[in-house]
Image: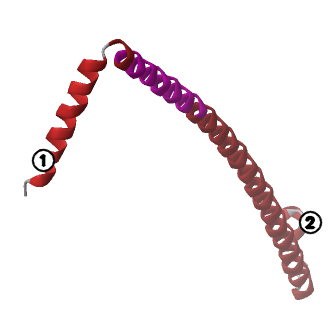
Amino acid sequence: MARKLAEVTTSETTTEDLSAQVATLRQDMSALTELLGEFGKAKSAELAESTKEKFETLRDDTRARAALATEAASDQAAQLHSQANDFVKNQPATAMGVAAGIGFLIGFMSGRK
């Protein structure tokens, strides 16, 4: 590492001493640069892993919520289908009248331009 300040301030400082100190500073700067690079790579890998874990957790939660929503929609559709079947069985004449009215309405609207 670099020499102490007391050693440098002596009156016997020569060009060789200065060159040696500059070389030592260069080595120290190189070591620091390498250390900072390794630190940056480690932090980058740590951040990437953390982000990946958060993404996977969010993805799994979203899939679970979507599955629950799909199941709820399927149950509701089955319930509506059952209600429609019961209505047709219990009141066939009314169901035929409603179907004819809807058919007439659709035909009337599609025929007009």
Magenta segment's dominant SS is helix
Where does the image place residue 103, in percent across and percent down from the top left? 21, 39
Where does the image place residue 47, in percent across and percent down from the top left? 71, 50
Q: Is residue 98 above or below residue 26?
A: above
Report the side of 16 relative to 30 (left or right): right
Report the side of 88 relative to 10 (left or right): left
Which sits in the foreground, 104 or 13? 104
Q: Is residue 25 above or below residue 80?
A: below
Where does the image place residue 49, in percent across and percent down from the top left? 75, 49
Q: Is residue 73 above or below residue 90?
A: below
Which sits in the foreground, 64 or 34? 64
For disc 1, the marked residue is: 109
- Residue 50 position by quadrant: top right
Q: Which quadrant: the N terminus?
A: bottom right
Determine if the magenta segment contains residue 38: no
In the image, what residue occupies the spot 59% across and 37% down?
A: 62
Q: Which quadrant: the C terminus?
A: bottom left
Q: Residues within 10 Å of mark 2 (few under 14, many from 20)?
A: few
- Residue 37 position by quadrant: bottom right
Which sits in the foreground, 43 or 112? 112
Label 1 secondary element:
helix
Determine if the magenta segment contains residue 74: yes
Q: Which residues are magenta?
A: 67-87
In the image, what residue occupies the spot 92% across and 86% down?
A: 16
For disc 2, the marked residue is: 1
Q: Is residue 110 above or below residue 35?
A: above
